[in-house]
Image: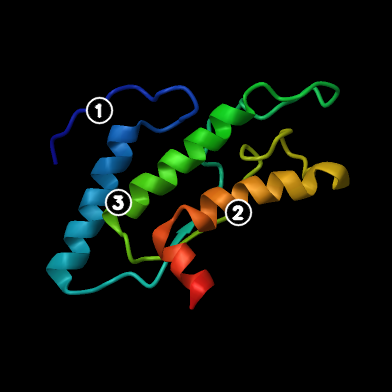
């Protein structure tokens, strides 16, 4: 397939356009073979390496960009596979501070924000919560 794509936007390591090409190919392959995916598993590291905070004594100024990037990736995948659950996992680049689970006092907020993006804003995932 001949396709061009732009460099990644801030917060991404792989360009949005390349991800669209991969998703379109996956969708066309499934349709041509008459199959549907049971689930899409994302192994983590949805955001660019280096955005997670390294200095644990200050708030991570990149956290809003990290959340936005994760939300955009999930929204794009959902747009190609609206009825397929997406099962993301947390990678070491997806945490507030690199390679570190959130401290107990921040865990509820951190996981709550991820839950919102991962489950409440992905239609197929939200449907699983209401079934």
Residue 88 coordinates in the image, percent (x, y): 53, 55
Cα separation between marks 1 and 3: 19 Å
Q: Residue at x 44, y 56 (%)?
A: 122
Tag 1 secondary structure: loop
Q: Are marks 3 and 2 in contact (CB under 8 Å)?
A: no
On the image, numbered disc 3 is attached to which residue?
A: 79
- Residue 5 has which mark? 1
* Dot 1 crowding, Cα within 10 Å, few <14, some 14–19, many 20+: few
**Which mark is first along the chain, 2 or 3?**
3
Q: Is residue 37 above or below residue 66?
A: below
Q: Left of 39 or right of it: where is 30?
A: left
The image quarter in which residue 57 lies: top right
Q: Left of 51 or right of it: where is 73?
A: left
User: Which numbered disc, 2 or 1, marks the residue closer to the eye?
Assistant: 2
Q: Residue at x 70, y 35 (%)?
A: 96
On the image, numbered disc 2 is attached to which residue?
A: 115
Cα separation between marks 3 and 2: 19 Å
Is residue 43 visible to the viewer in this orientation of the structure? no
**Which mark is first along the chain, 1 or 2?**
1
The image quarter in which residue 21 lies: top left
């Amino acid at each position: 397939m001949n396709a061009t794509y732009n460099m990644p936007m801030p917060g991404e390591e792989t360009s949005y356009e390349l991800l669209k090409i991969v998703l379109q190919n996956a969708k066309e392959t499934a349709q041509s073979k008459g199959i549907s995916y049971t689930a899409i598993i994302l192994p983590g590291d949805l955001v660019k390496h280096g955005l997670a905070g390294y200095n644990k004594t200050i708030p991570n100024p990149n956290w809003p960009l990290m959340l936005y990037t994760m939300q955009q990736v999930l929204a794009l995948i959902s747009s190609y596979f609206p009825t397929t659950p997406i099962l993301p996992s947390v990678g070491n680049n997806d945490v507030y501070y690199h390679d570190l689970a959130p401290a107990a006092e921040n865990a509820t907020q951190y996981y709550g924000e991820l839950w919102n993006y991962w489950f409440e804003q992905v239609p197929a995932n939200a449907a699983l919560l209401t079934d």
